[in-house]
Image (spheres, helix red, strand yellow):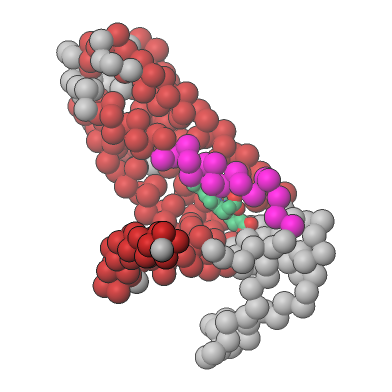
Amino acid sequence: MPRSRKSARRQRMEAAINYPIEWLEERSGLIGGVRYFLFRKVPSDTNWMQTLGSATLTAFIVQAVTGAILAMYYKPDPNSAYQSIQHITNDVWLGWLVRGMHRWGASVFIILMFFHMARVFLFGAYKYPRELNWIVGVLLLALGMLEGFTGYLLPWDQTAYWATVVGININGTAPFLGPFLAQFLRGGAEIGPDTLARFYSIHMLLIPGALIGLIGLHLYLVVRLGVTSPPWSKEAAGAERVEKPKRGRRGLLMPGARGGIPR
Ligand code: HEM
């Protein structure tokens, strides 16, 4: 009968789709992990403002993808850096678009990060037990801004050069560490070829690597601690009785004490 034939075909198709998923799950448990991450319980009255973290994450992913494409054409050498940027903008297919997305996306990323931070602050989501995630966020903010600063030099034009001179001089005036920081960033006494190579390495490898690690930790903590309800919520953190975990004389957690996690 056509109906049962169709359902048999459907079954075969489903089995074919499920086979690689089950294969992976059996050997890694990854699918369960992704399901745990995506299908968590969140407060019933979550707000659009709570999507700002995901928006920031999206902006970061756009920066990573467009940055990887730009790095295929960019040359971190004082004699060819500017020309390679001109080549990307004028000759490479859709190069102007990718470069524009990366340049404007950098501002979008920073602005979204500030909006997300303001949301966390206004919702009181930095309080117990999420203080550590706030600290991770502060590191993300500092690294995000440093990423913007190091990227700004790469076009190697007059604006880039003088903006970097000003930025390094400002950092150089910091007490104690300032001169060392300025020397480290310049890679010598003057801004020159070493500075460009250094900024490229920091911009391409060091900071993105640190950002990816910290974002992973940030999201792990979000999943572990749950999402905070809006302050006007009836389920707001503290509205229900939340016991702080019992602590010993030195402030260490007592065995078995984990404390309630306010949602
Ligand atoms: C690369 C930058 C960042 C990314 C990708 C990111 C991503 C996220 C995501 C996806 C969430 C969960 C959804 C949400 O609450 O919006 C979240 C929550 C949180 N973020 Fe961020 N974030 C970043 C920067 C920051 C900064 C700069 C701070 C503060 C200094 C911060 C502090 C927090 C806190 C405390 C939570 C928990 C909020 C809650 O429980 O309601 N994050 N973040």
Specify the segment rendered in magenta.
45-61
Q: Is 148 or 24 nearer to us in this picture?
A: 24
Task: Return the residue found at the far bottom.
Answer: 255
Residue 246 lies in the magenta stretch: no
In the displayed structure, 247 sits above or below 233; it is below
What residue appears at the point 18 percent right and 14 percent down from the top-left corner? Answer: 80
Q: Is 131 or 32 nearer to us in this picture?
A: 32
Q: Could you say where residue 92 lies in the image, as x and y percent from the top left?
A: 26, 15
What residue appears at the point 70 percent right and 81 percent down from the top-left corner? Answer: 243
Q: Could you say where residue 226 lies in the image, as x and y percent from the top left?
A: 60, 65
Q: Could you say where residue 150 lies in the image, as x and y percent from the top left?
A: 36, 30
In the displayed structure, 158 sits above or below 108; it is above
- Horizontal arrangement in the rendering, residue 142 relative to residue 52 (left or right): left
- Horizontal arrangement in the rendering, residue 241 relative to residue 249 (left or right): right
Q: Could you say where residue 231 lies in the image, as x and y percent from the top left?
A: 78, 56
In the displayed structure, 4 sits above or below 232; it is below
| Residue 89 shows in the view | yes
Secondary structure, magenta segment, majority class: helix
Residue 60 lies in the magenta stretch: yes
What residue appears at the point 34 percent right and 42 percent down from the top-left corner? Answer: 207
In the displayed structure, 156 sits above or below 29; it is above
- Quadrant location of the C terminus in the rendered image: bottom right
| Residue 170 shows in the view | no
